[in-house]
Amino acid sequence: MSEKDTISIHLVREALLQSCASEAASVEALSKVGIAPELLLQPGARVSATTYARLWRLLARRLDDEFFGMDPRPLKSGSLAFLCRVAMAQPTVAAGLETGLAFLSLMLEHLPAQLVRQQSLAEIVLLETEPEPRRAFSYFTYWMIVHGVACWLAGRRIPILAIELRCPQPDFCDDYRVMFSDNLRFDRPRTRMIFSADCLDLPIKRSAEELKRFLGHAPANILVKYRDPDSLATRIKHDLRQMPPDIWPETDGLAANLCISASTLRRRLAEEGQTYQGLKDSVRKELAIVWLAEPQISFAEIATRLGFADASSFYKAFRKWVGSNPGHYRSLILNETNRL
């Protein structure tokens, strides 16, 4: 794992919030894993994902709780390993997820969960009964565990289409957008994670040796790489968001705006594992998902906003991006009164 894979100091503070009873305990824990305590006072500071993982494991051992003491019932040490073992024994990712969620629902008092499949979309819903929502960090820690295990079971990354949370938006959520999805919605009636259902029928083919390697690197291996804010791809996506898609420049025009040649633009993006078309599709998908959550915006208007010739072209592109048609996705997002 590259040292560019970093975690904000904000998440370090969140991990310490309930885990360490005193400032002295926090300082001692940080020093033991190689984090300078004075970094807590620097809002822009970051630590490597491997260092954050060491802190995670240290706090879990000390509390005998792999959920940082954020539920009345501790998620005792070894729970993640047991979850993986029982899940990998199932025939498909869907069965593995259902088994894993059932285990977590038994272990955690306040976070029972259910996997729901609706045609080409799937959602994991937290069936909370407590009137007050959890902290955002609690929810995202839960999603990190569940999504990380699901990706390992599937043998590939499962793109998250949206995450809705009951809690208010925290002061800092940049890393959450990187780890999970740009489409985070707060103050919602339910907490749920929405993704394409195409991964659910994949067979699980994991060995004991693969499990050992996975657990040996957790949780660093389930943290998404930090996106370099100075990368060319990040700059281009930022610029695309500032203008209507129907006036986005072609490759030659973009290269001219950046004062480089088209061949240099393609080469530099390739070095970052990107293409200009892929960046445009990514921003279009991001905008479409946001606008589909607004019922007053028609499909035809979304198509026009995104620069498509007609609604049919938008439908075709959305199915390619998400695996679902826009109508089905909108009905799932807006069906907030449905109780499972």
Image (cartoon, grey):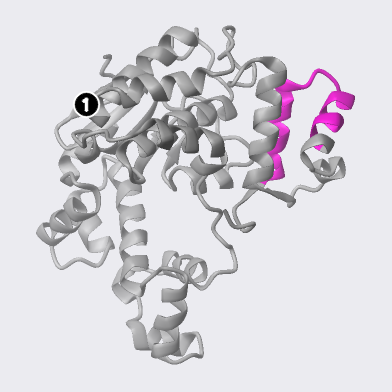
Residue 100 to residue 43: above or below: above
Label 1: which secondary element: loop
Q: Quick one: quadrant of the C terminus?
A: top left
**Number of numbered tags placed on the structure image:** 1
How far from the left and from the top, in percent, is residue 74?
59, 11
Which of the 4 image quarters holds residue 195?
A: top left
- Residue at 28% x, 19% y: name it: 337
Q: Which residues are magenta?
A: 8-30
83 vs 137, left or right, is left
**Which is nearer the eye, 34 or 40?**
34
The residue singled out by tag 1 in the image is: 91
How far from the left and from the top, in percent, is residue 291?
32, 48
Disc 1 marks a residue whose amino acid type is: Pro
How far from the left and from the top, in percent, is residue 70?
61, 17
Q: Main secondary structure of the magenta part?
A: helix
Going by the picture, which residue comes out furthest to the right?
Answer: 24
Query: Do we see residue 220 in this rendering?
Result: yes
